Amino acid sequence: MNTPASLKGFLDRTLVPGLTWTFPSKDKKGVAALGLTPKLQNVEQIVGISTYGASQSIVTLAGDNGRRMISNAIRHSVCPAATVLWLSFYHLDTVSNEERAKFLDQVKEVPKDLL
């Protein structure tokens, strides 16, 4: 019920200080503002696509850490004004092939809607 290590590693290597965010500047007294300063202000939307082996209620009870990490930590440190679209597919290991195909069709439509 957490973000895969490979995704976490990718984000750690690509969302680096100076490129995607900076530490806050200090005022004349040397006191820094709280929080990071986002630098990717041109980002308008972040899309997350996730599959789960559990139900939505179980994932929610467990905190849905991947969605929270992207929606809160990543978005706020990159571009707080960006919206987040999250596509979720639950019960992956017990649904039919038809349901899986329907979800994949939905995923294929996302890039078309972004343009």
Image (cartoon, grey):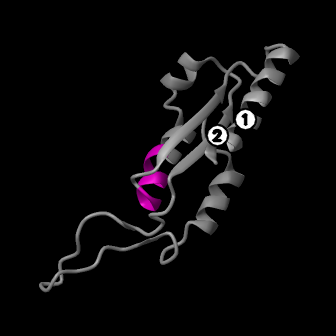
Graded by Cα atoms within 10 Å as few (under 14), some (14 to 19) or many (20 or more), the crowding at tag 1 reads: few
Residue 4, position in %: x, y? Answer: 68, 46
In terms of image quadrants, where is residue 98?
A: top right
- At a point 18% along the width and 77% down the height, the residue shown is 31
Q: Are marks 1 and 2 in contact (CB under 8 Å)?
A: yes
Comparing 13 with 107, the one in front is 107
Q: Residue at x 67, y 52 (%)?
A: 7
Name the spot of residue 113 as percent of width and height, x first. 64, 40
| 15 inside magenta stretch | no
Q: Which residues are magenta?
A: 71-79
Judge whether 115 appears above or below 109 on screen. below
**Which residue type carries mark 2?**
Asp
Say above or below: 79 vs 30.
above
Counting from the top left corner in percent of width and height, residue 73 is at 45, 52
CA distance separating discs 1 and 2: 7 Å
**Disc number for residue 109:** 1
Give the percent coordinates (x, y) of residue 25: 28, 78
Total labels drawn: 2
Does residue 72 belong to the magenta stretch?
yes
Q: Which residue is mark 2?
A: 113
